[in-house]
Image (cartoon, helix red, strand yellow):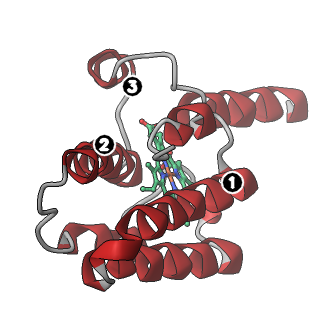
Amino acid sequence: MKQLIIVLLMSLVFFSCKQEKKEPKEELIMYQSSEMAALMNAMYEGNMTIKNKILAGESIGNFPETYLNIHSAVLTDPADRNTSFEAFSKLYIQDMQQVYSGSKDSLKQNFNQAVNSCIACHKTTCTGPIPRIKKLLIK
Ligand code: HEC
């Protein structure tokens, strides 16, 4: 019985964090995406758009307030919202706000710093999407 529970828990982790090879559409069909997973995918898309705008020298607009939902969105495993998660999400929001309010000269640097704070949190909780997130970095 204990082993069964462990296997179930492991497959839950697998589903929530090892989806990087699948397209978002496929994921939606395969399993019910958590609020947090949906927010994460939106942040990924949003930041890919910003990356392309920075590379094209276009204006990036305003900080998307929806990103603040990282403080409340329901996780696949609610136990993941621990003190470490809270600390990393605060850091991430600070870095992301700096992208929008900082100087134009340091835009690329500030953007990469925000992406690195995505990666920093993922190293502690959910390593699966890291290779995908690294694609956001501006070289
Ligand atoms: C504070 C920690 C933290 C930060 C910051 C963070 N993530 Fe996540 N991310 C998670 C956790 C935890 C999950 C698993 C969510 C779930 O399954 O409910 C996740 C899931 C994901 C997923 C997979 C979603 C799915 O469909 O399963 C992607 C992609 C992702 N994050 C990208 C990003 C990007 C891009 C950023 C920065 C713009 C970012 N994350 C910032 C913790 C974080």
Q: Is mark 2 within 8 Å of ligand 1?
A: no
Q: Is mark 3 within 8 Å of ligand 1?
A: no
Q: Which residue is mark 3?
A: 31
Neighbours of disc 1 within 10 Å: few (<14), some (14-19), many (20+): some
Neighbours of disc 2 within 10 Å: few (<14), some (14-19), many (20+): some
Q: Are marks 3 and 2 in contact (CB under 8 Å)?
A: no
Q: Quadrant of the N terminus?
A: top right
- Rendered residue at 14%/73% (across/down): 62
Q: How many marks?
A: 3
In the rendered image, residue 43, in percent from the top left (x then y), is placed at 32, 52
First in sequence, mark 3 or 1: give its number: 3
| 84 w.r.t. 125: above or below | below
- Rendered residue at 27%/84% (across/down): 101
Q: Which residue is mark 2?
A: 48
Q: Which residue is mark 1?
A: 125
Q: Nearer the viewer, residue 102 or 37?
A: 102
In the rendered image, residue 26, in percent from the top left (x then y), is placed at 33, 15
Residue 52: assigned label:
none
Single out the mark in the foreground, 3 or 2: 2
The amino acid sitting under disc 2 is: Met
Q: Is mark 1 within 8 Å of ligand 1?
A: yes
In the rendered image, residue 125, in percent from the top left (x then y), is placed at 68, 54
| 137 w.r.t. 113: above or below | above
Quarter of the figure with residue 69: bottom left
First in sequence, mark 3 or 2: give its number: 3
- Distance from Cα at disc 2 to Cα at disc 1: 22 Å
From the viewer's perspective, tell me whether residue 9 is left or right of residue 1: left
